Image (spheres, grey):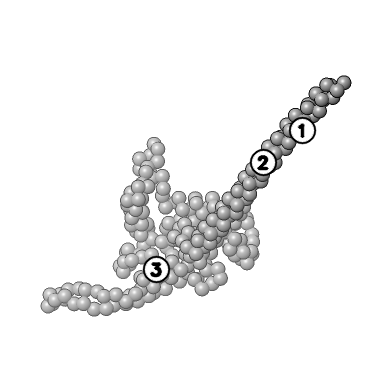
Amino acid sequence: MLLAATGMRAVEALSTRITDLDLDFNPPKLFVRGEYTKTKVDRLIFLTEEATQQLKSWLDYKYRTRRVCHQDKQSGKTITEFRTQVKNNNDLVFAVYQSNDRQNPKYLYRDLSRSFANTLDRSGRGDKEDGNSRRRKITLHSFRRFVKTTISDLGYADFSEWFIGHSGSTYWTKKDLEKAEIFRKVEPYLTFLNIPQLERQGADIQSKVEELEEINQSLRNRDKLKDDAISQLSDQLVALSTRLQEIERRQQLIT
């Protein structure tokens, strides 16, 4: 969800710490550390409301109180207890391991890539590129291309360069307020699971379809009335022609 809504590189997203999130800001934002970016430059990314809620839900779940079972080394008995993981603001948001060596974004990237590949295979979308049997058609980078294309197609090409952190975007200077206003305009196109909004859009489409059907039926009725009127006029014209011929025949007989 985060990659599809921000266009971040996978390692950039995996390097996000809790302290890098400002989920109560308007709009919510995420700080990307330059040491994990391709350009080696720090930057800020705006977050959609949908992605913000997903992040909040994930953090609540990650630091929930849970039941843990472990074996006592001395007695050999199984001990069950409830534990709550201590939240550290320097924790990586997407790290699920406690050991420090597994809190490395590069290690997490290998784990994520493997899981993503398995997900593609299970969903029947794990096709490989033509001529390259080692690379899949859909990769984690596909989300980045999607975000760039979506924003550019809306007419905000310069903003898209800045949003995904391309080096050329340094020449595009806008105030933060102006950037936030543009983001609000593109946010609906980076939102995917807003069911009420989708239902409203569906209702609007349905109403438009019904309106078009009514117009179509009205035109058909009008065409039918027009055809009936033409047919009636044609009959009257034939009758008048017959009567005129009869009058001319009588005049000839009298003469």
| Residue 196 location (% of width, % of height) | 50, 64
* Residue 130 screen position, x and y as percent: 40, 38
Q: Are marks 2 and 3 in contact (CB under 8 Å)?
A: no
Kind of element beneath mark 2: helix
Which mark is on residue 58? 3
Say few, some or many: other residues with alpha carbon within 10 Å of mark 1 (under 14 / 14 to 19 / 20 or more).
few
Q: Nearer the viewer, residue 94 or 189?
A: 189
Depth check, mark 2 against mark 3: the one in front is 2
Question: Image height check: is 56 above or below 147?
Answer: below
The CA span between labels 2 and 3 is 68 Å
Q: Residue furthest left?
A: 75
In the rendered structure, which disc, 2 or 1, sits on the residue that comes first in sequence?
2
Q: Is residue 24 left or right of residue 129?
A: right
The residue carrying mark 2 is: 228
For residue 235, above or below residue 21: above
Left or right for 224, reference 192: right
| 81 on left or right of 237 | left
Q: Amino acid at mark 1?
A: Leu
Q: Earlier in the sequence, mark 1 or mark 3?
A: 3
Disc 2 + disc 1, Cβ < 8 Å = no
Q: Nearer the viewer, mark 2 or mark 1?
A: 1
Q: Farthest right residue?
A: 255
| Residue 118 seen from this side | yes
Residue under label 1:
240
Measured as percent of width and height from the top left, residue 52 is found at 47, 67
Type of amino acid at the residue the image marks with label 2? Asp
Closer to the camera, 213 or 72? 213
Question: What distance separates the C-alpha of mark 2 from that of mark 1?
Answer: 18 Å
- Which of the 4 quarters of the picture holds residue 14? bottom left
Amino acid type at circle 3 is Trp
Q: Residue at x 80, y 23 (%)?
A: 249
